[in-house]
Amino acid sequence: MPTEILMPALSPTMEEGTLAKWLVKEGDTVASGDVMAEIETDKATMEFEAVDEGTIGKIVVTDGTEGVKVNDVIAILLEDGESADDIGDTTAKAAPAEASPAEAPAAGTSSNEAAPAAPAAAPAKDGERVFASPLARRIAADKGLDLSQISGTGPHGRIVKTDVENAQPGAKPTKAAAVEQTAAPAAMAAGPATDVVLKTYEGRPFEEVKLDGMRKTIAARLTEAKQSVPHFYLRRDIELDALIKFRSQLNKQLEPRGIKLSVNDFIIKACALALQQVPEANAVWAGDRTLQFDKSDVAVAVAIEGGLFTPVLQDADMKSLSALSAEMKDLASRARDRKLAPHEYQGGSFAISNLGMFGIDNFDAIINPPHAAILAVGAGVKKPVIGDDGEIKVGIVMSTTLSVDHRVIDGALGANLLNAIKENLENPMTMLA
């Protein structure tokens, strides 16, 4: 029976995308793992791989089509012995019945398999129908496997080829290895209705700018964050004179290796170490609990045309300054080209937003859930400071603001975290110990 290839969810926030380019054509044979298409998500252009094997019988959605919803049919896959004549029969059988909630494919999954059109003779588990691809059924029959005893990793728990290949006869169902992530809400930023705004500015010249997927996602996620996360803010000025002097010395020594450390590299390291020094703050909000981490995974906001990415530097507490610098440059470069994979900009417990390079003295950043905190970094500015000897001198001072989720981090804990960041930056040599 022909298999419907569905528009995948290639990121947790993806609800629709653009089918940028097909890399196969009708009549081509594909195997599991073959790249079939390039799909533009709300964050990047990504390759879409086949899950099953067969022949492309029909391409339903053409190159360049925008606004394709997740789980919409984009192509039809034929198995051995099937032809294009079978496609019409399949769609005709599938059309009359609307999928029940128990049978509908779940959003947020990434697979090219869909529910078989006819429910006849399907095995059952706990009284409910078991969904499996035709190829998976065939392999299960050959191996003598009971499909009701296999957990599927396809859409809505559908059993696919790899599930039955890895299953053992008599095996009990096991939880799928990959935990499906919930898509971000589609709600746009609250405000006056479009027609009201248009009428307000009637008669004034303007240009309407269409929102792309990234801008829609930013609007939805940050509106949700500001409305649902109980923010509070902690502020400290940090003296940078020792850091700037130490950085200059290091860069001279690293020059033969082609390495040049930025102040931002030191900030990343300082935050990563502070999360180790105040481990209770190295956590995220998870609905009815918090998750506290052993390692410091730090996200850093990177501005790109039309929006921003927050690539994550994993295990940042364990890496040298030069390693962090090289990794950050690579992530930022690929972020601007929208070439990051989802695992490179998802996760982390803490984020940094540095607008000091744009001349901003200070600002408050919005937490990106499920993170528990984000550090807003301003520019280093020459100011009068009082030295240890009580004398007034000119120093370089950087203003920072820590936005904190009060559900995870209380005031005193947040203060300890920001104080640890300040201590690390004002004594940069200790970060190498």
Image (cartoon, rainbow, N blue to C red):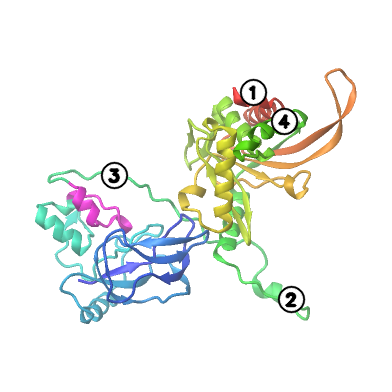
Residue neighbourhood size for the residue with mark 1, other residues' Cα within 10 Å, grouped as few (<14), some (14–19), many (≥20): few
> Is 341 in front, or is 323?
323
Which of pointers 2 and 1 indicates the residue nearer the eye? 1
Q: Which mark is residue 243?
A: 4
Q: Mark 1 points at which residue?
A: 430
Give the SS element for disc 2: loop
The C terminus lies in quadrant: top right
Is residue 312 visible in the rendered image? The answer is: yes
In terms of sequence position, does the residue under pointer 3 or pointer 4 come before the other?
A: 3
In the picture, measured across the screen, residue 228 lies left or right of residue 377, that is left
In terms of sequence position, does the residue under pointer 1 or pointer 4 come before the other?
A: 4
Image position of 160 with respect to 328: above or below: below
Q: Are marks 2 and 1 in contact (CB under 8 Å)?
A: no
Q: Name the residue under label 3.
A: 175
Q: Do the residues labelled 2 and 4 touch (CB within 8 Å)?
A: no
In terms of sequence position, does the residue under pointer 2 or pointer 3 come before the other?
A: 3
CA gap, disc 1 to disc 4? 11 Å
Give the SS element for disc 3: loop
Q: Do the residues labelled 3 and 4 touch (CB within 8 Å)?
A: no
Residue visible at 43% across and 71% down in the picture: 21
In terms of sequence position, does the residue under pointer 1 or pointer 3 come before the other?
A: 3
